[in-house]
Amino acid sequence: MVNLETPLSKFPTVKKAIFKKLHSLGLNKAQDLLYHFPFRYDDFSKTVAIREIMPEVPVTIHGRLQLLTNRRSFAARKMVTEGIIADEGGQIKAVWFNQPYLIKNLQVGDELYLAGKAELNKYGLQLVNPVYEKERKDGSTLNTGRLVPVYPTTSGLSQKQIRFLIKTSLDAATLLPEWLPAKIVKQFNFLPLAESLKEVHFPTGDKKFEQVKKRFQFEELFLIQLRNELWRQDLFKSGGAVNIKFQEEATRTFVEHLPFKLTTDQRSAAWEILQDLEKGRPMNRLLDGDVGSGKTVVAAMAILNTVVGGCQATLMAPTEILATQHYETFIRFFEGFPVRVGLLTSHLCKFAGGDSKKELLDKSKLGEIDLLVGTHALVQDKIKFKKLGLAIVDEQHRFGVEQRHKLQKKGRGTKVPHFLSMTATPIPRSYALSLYGDLDLSLIKHKPVGRKAIITKLVEEVDRGKAYDFIRRQIKTGRQVFVICPLIEEEEKSDKKSVMTEYKMRVGEKEDVIGKFLTREFDILVSTSVVEVGVDIPNASVMMIEGAEKFGLAQLHQFRGRVGRSEHQSYCLLFSKAVNQKTKQRLQYFVENSDGFALAEKDLEMRGPGEVFGTTQHGFPELKMADLSNLEMVKQSREVAKMILEEDPALAQNPLLKEKIKDWEKTVHLE
Ligand code: ADP
Ligand code: MG
């Protein structure tokens, strides 16, 4: 009998290789599987007659296998298994790629269910890679003939395997304690947890399924809100913020000495921030502006005021390259100003007059460094400040909430430092509120004038050669080129987690390569989405994107922002094999629009918030169920969270809830 703690390695079907894959998805024991939610459901609920099959519509059919053969397709370099299945009124061909073992599992004459989509080609309709299932004795099915859950997975671990494991684990669901306070369960009429879990994994009917979905959506939003509230409580009990007076004189001199004129948006953002610094409560502001909109100089003004006002500042960036770039930029900005800048990453340590890590740490502790720039290395316990007044996080979506909090907590002992995060991901106001509660927003909507627009083109496949010629010419004139390819093509691998694992593994190597590109050791940098981070390579003038349809508009816009950062005319070339009209329209919209906020809105409209904001790569917790655009539910969850904490601030009477938040925090953050 399975219990919550049963290790998955004890499951009879889980061999070592499979266990490794499960582990890589964060699945180690039965309990983990219960909350491994489907990211999609395919509606195979109606069995249709074979002659009624339409192209591209998911169906389940029931029939008898008439023929089954393996052949090698040299053109496609694949093993192809072909079968013919028939019911009373018709027959259809089914093809499977690279699954030659099917021949062993199935026999001519078997009664089967097949679920999948049919494609129309020159030989007629055929089912491609359908899920198959032999009829069971009791006539029930697990994988076909129903709303079929599709789970996040990784290559080599099939949906079938996962479904089977979850089915087995569900026996333990009744052992899972209800962690939602009884009051809430009652108020919202939620079904018991075990029953809800069963329904999520194996939906039985529309009404119940919808009701259960609500419960899990609520859970997620509620946890987000609780976490925000807890953090706020924590900050506020520590006695207000450092008070930083507006330094008019220094600010004016700084602005006068800039090599450019500040834009109106930069001015108002800076002004909003400087006003916040004077208030007795800690600032919590997000500075949101397109790539290249000039956020750094705004941050510099906040830093200057902080330092001249007698406090220290720190800025954390997601990569070593970016931190180094910031370090150099700030040294330039603060020439002639009393701001002593230091750089600290896991490998690097720099400051005027030295490179000893120990010395830098001492200086920071004694207040002899005014601005410490670095990577996540900054959050280590041994890094201390004398009087931290302002903590800044650049590309904030690249950090876990935990790390951001740790940085801000560096001010402990004195007062709470102000907090500024920066992002180039355009976040509509309502979403920011859902996620971050009482966050304030400053937007930089317009870029500095005089930038050349980036010429964007959707290149037809027939013109690929011309595009290459063009790239060659650009390189000849001394420019550099980015090429972006989508990471993984196959459906099975398209899961976010596996992308993330891969991403983590190669981070060091990657920085090294980008560094070499920066010093022009290469002309072309081919990569997956990693260049998204705000690295400045002004010499690059072409951004070529393969499989453009695989990316969201906001993401494409991030890529495009990697070029056009100098006086050279820059280009963004999109390649796409998509034939779908809607997809083409989406890309065309991108070609014609260069406003990041407009693109984000369009993205939302066309793909929905789940796809646009549902991934960790955009800095949002990985929401399995919740829909951030459901503002009503967001509001409700916030009210409930506040109510619970008002009655029970330390969650002493809700130990299960407290435990749940801890577990949940571990699963939703990157780091
Ligand atoms: P991002 O918002 O992407 O972080 P940066 O702060 O790196 O952008 O700024 C991009 C470039 O624009 C930098 O080289 C910066 O010096 C320059 N810049 C910033 N503000 C202005 C301005 N008002 N006019 C002209 N150039 C500017
Ligand atoms: Mg930046």
Image: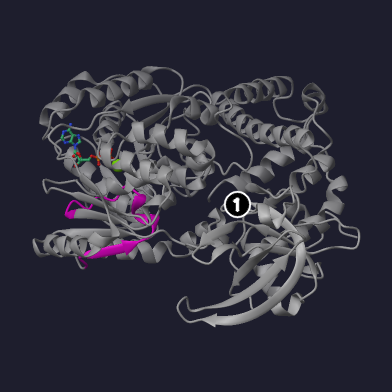
Q: Is residue 173 above or below residue 139?
A: above
Quadrant position of residue 188: top right
Instruction: Identify residue for label 1.
Output: 54
Tell me if I can see residue 71 in this picture.
yes
Q: In this figure, which colouring scheme has been used for the structure?
A: one colour
Q: Residue 126, percent across and down? A: 59, 63
Residue in the picture at 54% in, 61% down? 493
Q: Is residue 72 magenta?
A: no
Identify which residue, 476 or 490, lies in the foreground: 490
Binning the other alpha carbons within 10 Å of mark 1 as few (below 14), some (14 to 19) or many (20 upward) gives: some
Quadrant of the image where one finds ligand 2:
top left
Query: How far from the left and from the top, in percent, is residue 520?
Result: 19, 64
Q: Nearer the viewer, residue 348 or 647?
A: 647
Quarter holding residue 60: bottom right
- CB at mark 1 closer than 8 A to ligand 1? no
Residue at the limit of the structure toward the front, as seen here: 89
Vertically, is 305 above or below 378? Answer: above
- Where 647 sits versus 110, above or below? above
Q: Residue 262: where, in percent of width, then height?
A: 18, 27
Residue type (three-letter) at the residue carrying disc 1: Met
The correct choice, above or below, for 587 with respect to 84 in the image is above
Side of 535 where 501 appears, left or right: right
Q: How many marks?
A: 1
Q: Residue at x 57, y 53 (%)?
A: 55
Read off the magenta span.
Answer: 522-540
Q: Quadrant of the N terminus?
A: bottom right
